[in-house]
């Protein structure tokens, strides 16, 4: 599968990340699209079947691919394999991401706030740090990139709450507006940590573009927590485009 094909896959399945990558320089796009195509496939795996065993097999396929000596027979395999060969530090990170998705197979509620926080950390903070690593991020920026990824992951998860609830799931430890506001405040705190260190991002700064909506969405959730359950946690098209352009031009989020 070519980079262009990976890009098409992300465009169809993850349009927000597609827009973020397209705002990055061409050299960065070539490294980010295989990573995000992989993430899309892993995120989908628990939901394409109602059979837990089949879902487990799909996730195991991706775990095996991470350490395969040669690309496997899958459309994402070639570009992903090349990326892992170039950046082997990604392997344990992406393995953690896959492992976290096993929670989605169980369809069980989170046992605690700590379990929920760990899920966002593994699925979102780890993904953004992986993106930063593919662009050559310095080790000392890990805390900031992970904080930004956690904030962005929480914002995206809160947007998904109505769809998860419609599946008869309990996506949040507590759906009470007060609890949602506390969550949003936690996300804003993570965002503040990242903002204080954004000048250190260097050449890996385009990885941060994936978090371009996080600040506005978390503010909405904090100001009016009922928007989460109502499914109205969203930016206008004008605000979406403006936020991404502003971030790409200034690096601010």
Image (cartoon, rainbow, N blue to C red):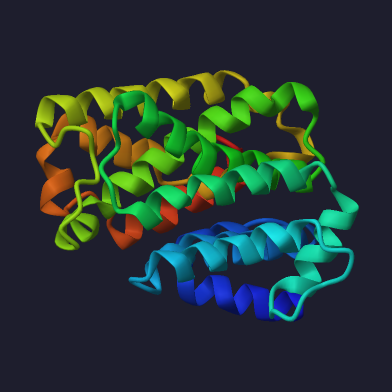
Q: Name the side, left or right, on which 245 lies relative to 222.
A: right
User: Looking at the picture, how far across and down is residue 92, in whole percent?
Assistant: 72, 42
The answer to whether residue 253 shows anywhere in this view is: no
Q: Is residue 245 above or below residue 114?
A: below
User: Looking at the picture, how far across and down is residue 122, in whole percent?
Assistant: 53, 39
User: Looking at the picture, how far across and down is residue 230, in whole percent?
Assistant: 10, 51
Q: Name the side, left or right, on which 13 lies relative to 156.
A: right
Q: Nearer the viewer, residue 114 or 10?
A: 114
In terms of image quadrants, where is residue 111? Answer: top left
User: Looking at the picture, how far across and down is residue 37, in whole percent?
Assistant: 61, 67
Give the tally of numbered discs: 0
Q: Residue furthest front?
A: 53
Q: At x 44% / y 38%, what residue is drawn?
A: 119
The answer to whether residue 187 shows anywhere in this view is: yes
Q: Nearer the viewer, residue 229 or 97?
A: 97
Q: At x 25% / y 42%, what residue is drawn?
A: 109
Q: Nearer the viewer, residue 222 or 103?
A: 103
Q: At x 40% / y 64%, what residue is drawn?
A: 52
Q: Name the side, left or right, on which 16 lies relative to 106.
A: right
Q: Name the side, left or right, on which 150 lies relative to 159.
A: right
Q: Nearer the viewer, residue 151 or 239?
A: 151
Q: At x 65% / y 38%, what residue is drawn?
A: 129
Quarter of the image for the N terminus: give it: bottom right
């Amino acid at each position: 599968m070519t980079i262009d094909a990976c890009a098409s896959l992300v465009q169809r399945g993850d349009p927000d990340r597609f827009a973020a990558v397209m705002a990055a320089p061409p050299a960065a796009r070539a490294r980010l699209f295989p990573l995000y195509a992989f993430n899309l496939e892993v995120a989908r795996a628990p939901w394409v079947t109602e059979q837990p065993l089949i879902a487990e097999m799909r996730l195991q396929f991706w775990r095996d691919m991470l350490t395969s000596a040669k690309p496997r027979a899958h459309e994402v395999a070639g570009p992903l394999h090349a990326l892992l060969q170039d950046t082997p530090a990604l392997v344990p990170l992406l393995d953690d991401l896959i492992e976290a998705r096993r929670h989605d197979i169980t369809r069980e509620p989170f046992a605690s706030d700590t379990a929920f926080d760990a899920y966002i950390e593994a699925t979102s903070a780890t993904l953004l740090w992986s993106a930063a690593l593919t662009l050559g991020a310095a080790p000392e920026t890990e805390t900031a990139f992970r904080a930004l990824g956690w904030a962005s992951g929480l914002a995206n998860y809160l947007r998904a709450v109505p769809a998860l609830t419609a599946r008869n799931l309990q996506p949040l430890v507590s759906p009470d507006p007060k609890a949602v506001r506390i969550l949003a405040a936690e996300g804003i705190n993570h965002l503040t940590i990242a903002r204080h260190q954004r000048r250190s991002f260097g050449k890996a700064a385009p990885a941060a573009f994936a978090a371009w909506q996080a600040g506005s969405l978390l503010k909405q959730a904090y100001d009016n927590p009922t928007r989460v359950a109502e499914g109205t946690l969203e930016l206008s098209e004008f605000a979406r485009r403006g936020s991404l352009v502003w971030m790409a031009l200034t690096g601010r989020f």
